[in-house]
Image: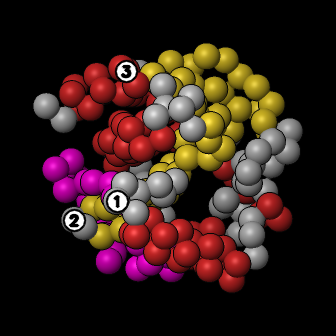
Amino acid sequence: MSYEANVVVDPALVNVRDVVEEDVRKLIDYWYHSPPGFIEAMGIEPSKLLPEQEFQKWMVNECKASRLLVDSKSRSLTITYKEEAVGSHAISPLIEGDHGVFHAHIWAPEMRGKGIARITYPKACLIFMERFGLSRILFKTPIQNIAAIRVKEKLGIRCIGEEIVSFDIIRDGTRAKVFELTRQEAERLVKCHFP
């Protein structure tokens, strides 16, 4: 699905759900076929990505495994608009029962900057908190990713400092702003934005 650049997002039509096999192609296109320099500008190190075929197999297997469980243990959620997949949230690394590091990506270029992440951050955070028994979620956002920092600031998520990070697919030695959200704060955000 393609949207006009001037689309106004109806918050009631934005949601999050587990990633399903049909989403994997868009996820792969985002990570492996975005314009040159796009993911690098966010602090991502492409050489840290799994080979494309391996990533596809891993994601499809995670989708299948989660579907078989009574309570999903997927670490990935799809952001939808009008039930169409437009982005994702993930949590990694994760220390079950304590905290995880939250990530957000809008795959559809025409949907970026429309306020979708402000709607989905609180919803996804609560899902991950409940799913993994987390008392808090951390956001370690590379300082050059200004749009992602603005989302957290607009939501009132507390910045607790800066640090040099090198985890998962983030470029080693990246300076990041660190934000923290407790379960109580996430519940308040959801109530405030979705009464």
Give the residue pinned by disc 2: 82
**Is residue 193 placed above or below 106 in the rendered structure?**
above
**Is residue 43 placed above or below 163 in the rendered structure?**
below
Q: In the image, 190: left or right of 96?
A: left
**Can residue 109 be seen at all in this image of the molecule?**
no
- Residue lying at 63% horizontally and 26% vertically, measured from the top left: 178
Q: Amino acid at mark 2?
A: Lys
Q: Nearer the viewer, residue 45 or 18?
A: 18
Q: Amino acid at mark 3?
A: Glu
Q: Amino acid at mark 1?
A: Val
17 drawn magenta:
yes
Q: In the image, 66: left or right of 96?
A: left
Give the residue pinned by disc 1: 70
Q: Which residues are magenta?
A: 1-28
The single residue placed furthest to the left in the displayed view is 195
Q: Nearer the viewer, residue 72 or 80?
A: 72
**Labels 3, 1: front one:** 1
The single residue placed furthest to the right in the displayed view is 173
Mark 3–mark 1 Cα distance, whole angstroms, equals 27 Å
**Is residue 128 placed above or below 180 in the rendered structure?**
below
Mark 1–mark 2 Cα distance, whole angstroms, equals 26 Å
Decide which of tag 2 and tag 3 comes sooner along the chain: 2
